[in-house]
Each structure stands twice: as C-alpha cells, then as structure tokens.
Amino acid sequence: MYQYDQYDQAMVDTRVAEFRDQTARRLDGRISEEAFRPLRLMNGLYLQLHAYMLRVAIPYGTLSGAQMRLLGDIADKYDRGYGHFTTRQNIQYNWIKLSEAPDILADLATVEMHAIQTSGNCIRNISADQYAGAAADEITDPRPYAELLRQWSSFHPEFCALPRKFKFAVIGSETDRAAMRLHDIGIQIVRNAAGELGCAFYVGGGMGRTPMIAPLINAFVPLDQLITYSEACLRVYNRYGRRDNKYKARIKILVHELGKDEYTRQVEAEFAHLLTQNIEPPLAEFARIKAFFADPAFDPAAPDAMPNGDPAFLRWVKANTAAHKARGYAIAVISLKPAGGIPGDASADQIRTMADLARDYSFDEARVTHTQNIVLPHVRKADLFALWQKLVDADLATANLDSIGDIIACPGLDYCSLANARSIPVAQRISEKFAAPVRQDAIGELKLKISGCINACGHHHAGHIGILGVDRKGVENYQLSLGGSEGADCSLGTITGPGFSEDGIVTAVEQVTEVYLAQKQGEERFLDTYRRIGMAPFKEAIYG
Amino acid sequence: MVEPQLRFRDDAPVDSPAIGLADFTAGSNVAAVRIEAGEDARLLLPHLASLRLVEIVFPAFTDGRGMSAARVLREAGYAGELRAVGAVLVDQLAAMRRCGFDAFAPAKPLDAKDAEAALARWGIVYQSAADGVRPIWALRHAAAG
Amino acid sequence: MNILTGNDLKSGAVVWWDGGAWSHDVNAAADVGSDGDAINAREEAAQRVVSAYIIAADAGPHGIRPAHIKDRIRALGPTVRLDLTLQPGDADAATRVI
C-alpha cells in the first residue's frame, strides 16, 4: 500500500489547518454560506436532510486495517455508530456537526486519510478496480497510476472551479470491474505491440440525467505522458465545458456536442503544447509509487485446494470469493447487503471487525467496491473457513455477491437532499423477497441498482435491472429499466414503461425474474436472456 | 480602471484603462487589455511583447475559466501584470497565484489578514504550474535529478 | 399554514421557527402566515440557520404535517432507521410520513 512521506503528510495537515480556519470564519460569520459551500464541499462536507454529511476519501478503494479501524472509531466518536460505503469507493457519515468536522479531518490525517475533493466541481477521488493487485486476469496493478493521478489532481490550481464534478477510474484488466467507461475519464492500462505499458483514454462517459458510454479518444498514451495528457483533457474541458446549464456541464456533453473527433483534436493540440511545459513527473516518481504496491509476501507453500465443509460455508465460497493471481490464495468479498438491510451500511463494530480481519487474514489490506461491499484481497484458501466463521459471528457472512440481493442503492430520500424518492426501503423489500438461497441461486447473476433521483448515484442506468425513484406530484414513484451493464459489455438500460408505486415495483421485479427463469436457455445469465429475447416478453408480463 | 487591492510586482502599474479583447484585436495599440470569461486568451499571443497588463474577469467565484486563461498566457511567456478582477475570494488567492496572477482586484475587498494567511499557507505543491514552484515530485527526486 | 424550516448552522440539525426561536420539533412550528420572507431575511443575517425556506403544512391529529414528503422525512428522521428519529418508540411513524 502507498505510504505518505513528509510531503504528503504536510499536504493533508495543511488542509486540516486551512479547513479549521475556514470553518471558524464561517461560524463567526466572516464567510457567507454561498462562499463557504464550495469550500466545505471540497472537503467532502454536504448539508443533507438531517445534518451535515462527511464523505471521506478512500483513494482507489484501498485501505489498511488501521485506517479501517479509525473509520469505525469516527462513526462512534462523531456520528451515530455507523457509516455508509458508497459507489465511489468512499465512506460517508450522516450525522456530522460542522463544528466538529475539522477535528474529524485531523483524526483522519493521523492515519494518512482525508476528505479532499470528495465533492465539489473538481477532480474527485480516483477509483480503480477493487481487485487490483490480486486479480488473476490483471495486466498490471492500476493503483500506482491512480496514486500518481491522485497527487496531480489534489489542490490542482487550474481545475478547482470546473464546470462540474469530474471522475476518473483506472483499471488494469480486460474485465472491467470499475464501470470505467461510465466515468468522465476512464483509463485502461494496456500493453502495445512493443510490450510497453500505456494508457487507453476513454473520455466523456457518465450516468446522471444524460447517461453516456465514454468513447476511446487515445488508444495508447505512454506512461511518461499520463499526467500531461490528463491535463490537456481537463484544460479543454475547463475552457469550453458548458457553464450555462448545470445539467449540461459534465464533460460528456462537451464531447458529445463537439463530437469525439473534434474534442480529441483539441486535446491533442493542447497536449502538444503542454509537452513543451515539462509538467510530467519523472518515471522515477512512478517507480517510487509503484514500489509501494509490490506484492505482499505470499506463501509459496500455501495449499491450493479449496477447503470443504459446511454447506453454508461452501455457498459463501462459491458466491463471495474470486480467483487470485497467487497460488493458494483467494479474493474474499464481505457483502454489506444482508436481506432486509441497508446496502453499504456497516456499524462501528462491524467496521472494526473488518479491520481486524484485514489485519489477520489479508496482509492488513482491505478494499471498498463500487458495489458497496468490502474486499479482503489476499486470503489464504486454507484460512477461508476461519474467516467465514468470524464473519458469521459479526453478521457479515451474507453469500450473495452479484446476485439479486447484492443491490446497489443510493441513500435516497431518507438522507439525501437531492433525492426525489426513497431508495433504501425498495432495496430492503426486494432483498427480503429474494432472500431464500434457493431462489437467489436459481436466478444467478443479476445486478439490481436503485437511484433515488436522476443523478444516478445508485447506477440504475447500468443495472441489469435498474430502478429510478421519481417524485410524481409529491408521491414516490419508481421507473423500471432493463438491460444495463457496467462491464466490458457496457450498455445502458431501457425503461420498461410507466412507473410503479413502492408495492408495484417490487411485484414488477418479481415478474421480470419469472420471465427470465421461464425463458432462460442453458447457462444464460439474466442479461444474456434479456439481450436475446428483448424487452417485449418482459413488458407483457409486467403490464399485461 | 480597476485598482488592484493586492499587487505582487515591483514595476509601476499601467495607468491607462484596459480595453476589451475585441477592440484590442481590432487594432488598438494600448498596453492594457481585459478578457472576459469565455474569451480566448490565445488571441493575445501574437501581442504579448507589447502588453503590460492583462485583466482577467471572474464573473462568479465558481467560474474557473480564468485559471486556464492565466496559465495559457504565462506558458506563452507573458511577463506583464496579470490581474484577477471580479469575483475573487480569499480562499482562491493561492490557486490564482499558482496559475500566474500577480495582482487582484476583487469586487468585494478582502480582509487583509485573511488574505495574508491564505497566501502564506501552502508552502509545497503537488503540480507544476505557472508560479515556478518546484512540485513535490521534483523535491523527492532532487538528488537524482 | 405556512411554516419556516432550515438547518442549524453549527450542527446541521433540522430546525423549525417557533415564533421566537428555532426548535427541533416540527410541532413547535409557528404559522408565519405571510411574514415568512421577512423572518427569513432577518434570520439569514443572524447566521444561525442555513438554507431556510417556507413550506406549506397542515395541523392534523398527529401534529403538524408538512405538505411535501421531503419535509415530512426531515421532520421525523430517516424512515429506515427509526431508532435514530425523533420518535424512536413509534413503529408507525414511518408509515404516517409517507
């Protein structure tokens, strides 16, 4: 894992002091709310329905046991005993006091954490493949690239008042586990014909009101030009992105309106100019960062046989583990989606338990996934049973990864001031309805995603089944869409038709799964069947 | 003419008012020009040698286009005064300095002490920008370089 | 009735104008009639409360009920964590809000 040196530490410490000063000026009235708002947002602090909410950055979703433990302690000390893991691989707390926010940032800084640029119209926390450094199918670990980008983007003076927020994702595998092409910039690390590593740049993707899949604008940016190329992409956006309409301000609209080719031409011209400015960190800096992400000391003698035993354990192994690159190891995923639970929520005790488990079973490392689960990336197969038993004790052993119970849901109208409808109760009712293992197993892989408003924090466009909450004359209403996917086969869902009440949407989801089970051929997943048979049979079942 | 509240230059200020970009590029022979957000700073590049003051207008503190405009001019070698005009807040001064501004004419005067503190706060920086400050990556590899 | 609501600057907590001060209890909310804007302007200058706005509400059998669901949820707390709401002992509170 990356570790701060004195410079990184000085940057976060300075930020804490700066925000303490800004908060003091706000509390004594020297700064207006209007002027303070962007300052607090750049430190992850929102004003939500019931209180301030603090979003803490977990860069590329990677954190140590000590960092995870502190997140649990913050939940107890400053919040109400729990936290919410988000689709940006971050964690947020729902009951924060403005007057205490600087103290929380100071606590975070003691374990090399911060809340820098987790909101606001700036470059947000860089996300990455949650299996980075562990996945069997990886070309290279994307996190050194993400860390290089993190440092470049932190307090970037030119890009602190962009037209709108800006999200990067970086992956290093063919398999896209980070919804890379649904980001403002998605970077895939690739190898060229000469065997060198470089970056494929996809620019202008996103969800929200106008979902778009990012087009490829450069298939191979050499590694020693990554920052310069990123700067060129951002400068063109900062200069020409729309500022007249908040809903048209994301880079996807600029790329769409200019056309991919014209946007690319402008970027290449800016890039050629910036290459003369020597803004790129040397490869020695990349090498320094990369050294932190070296493999932990895997035991070459670790037994490779998958353990046998309790059927419930075997079911968990089947559902919640993935192939590891090292013999004798597995990637284990802790589901934060118990039937009837709140997706992504974990109590302070659960967070501390996960910290202990990371320390004891995974070389002191954990990951947060954009699907709101926690990964222990490096677990000896021989330890899986002991790990599972401890998860059972902590109510963390739900075996439902990528199944219909593993729902992504945004906080919705229960917490969020932007929401139009509640998301969590819908997720709870659906996960309860499909809780029976036999039913869940029959349905297999089915990614269900719920957003409580058009901003799409719950990624509904990318759900095999997507649900969007809307406000219909003061009453919650839910639109259903089918056929979205966030992976390498990225696609956007199609709305089935008129929306539903809360009861109605649960029934409609059930009807959709019944059509799938009746129509599925062979080993088809829900998405495969939908793509083969199209919308009509589903529509007929739902609307009659 | 907008008087700067803060100015970090030793030369004498230009005493003639800045004119708009359209008038300037139409052929005016003055040393001071003003560009609005959304105007292309690169149109000034052929004239940099004769310019002594460029005012860049910030219509709202959330509008960061002027940041890019400033860097574009500095990267092209402009050495005259670069003045941020309009919606300039105390907490943006440090970033503006990094982008190459060396004078500030905020629409609403800044508290002098707050401004001083904001400008003194960031001793080290992560990126290369227009202020010539060596970024952290350069400090890290100074011995090797 | 028209009532005035916002969030406490320091804590972020939901507050309601009770005629002389800000209360955490929606049932303490005063009908501001057509004075809402004036009170709001005065209170904004005092900088104790942020994002204050006027809403329509009804006085009903269970107390004051804001017209819009968002404000009813603000008045109660998250419907999915009744233990954290202002009425932790009332199992029907969430149903009434919707």
Image (spheres, coloured by chain):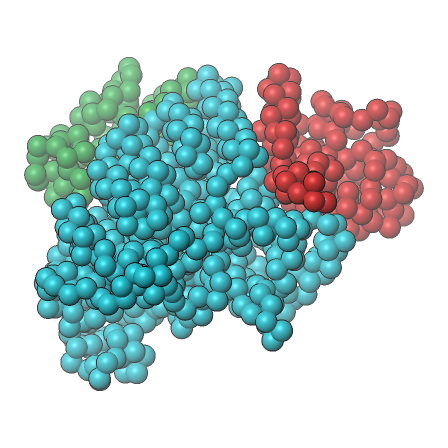
Chain colours: A cyan, B red, C green
> Image quadrant of residue A335?
bottom left
Of residues A210 and A408, the one drawn nearer to the viewer in this rendering: A408
Residue A288 lies, in percent from the top left, at: 57, 48
Q: Position of residue A86 (x, y in %)?
A: 34, 48
- Which is nearer the eye, B106 or A197? A197
Q: Looking at the rendering, in which quadrant would you find the C terminus of chain A?
A: bottom left
Instruction: Report how many numbered discs are placed on residues in the image.
Output: 0
Left or right, residue B35 beside residue A400 = right
Q: Which of A57 and B59 is in front in this view?
A: A57
Residue A466 appearing in the image: no
Q: Where is residue A276 in the image (x, y as percent from the top left)?
A: 76, 53
Q: Measured from the top left, where is residue A25 in percent x and y?
A: 49, 20
Q: Measuring 50% from the left and 38% from the top, which residue is drawn there?
A: A4
| A206 horizontally vs A314: left or right | right
Question: Residue at position x 60%, y 75% from top?
Answer: A193
Can I make out residue A56 in this image? Answer: yes
The residue under the point 41% across, 52% down is: A296
Residue B119 found in image quarter: top right
Residue A40 versus residue B141 in the image, above or below: above
* A375 left or right, relative to A504: right
Residue A145, placed above or below residue C26: below
Q: Which residue is drawn at 69% across and 58% down?
A: A271
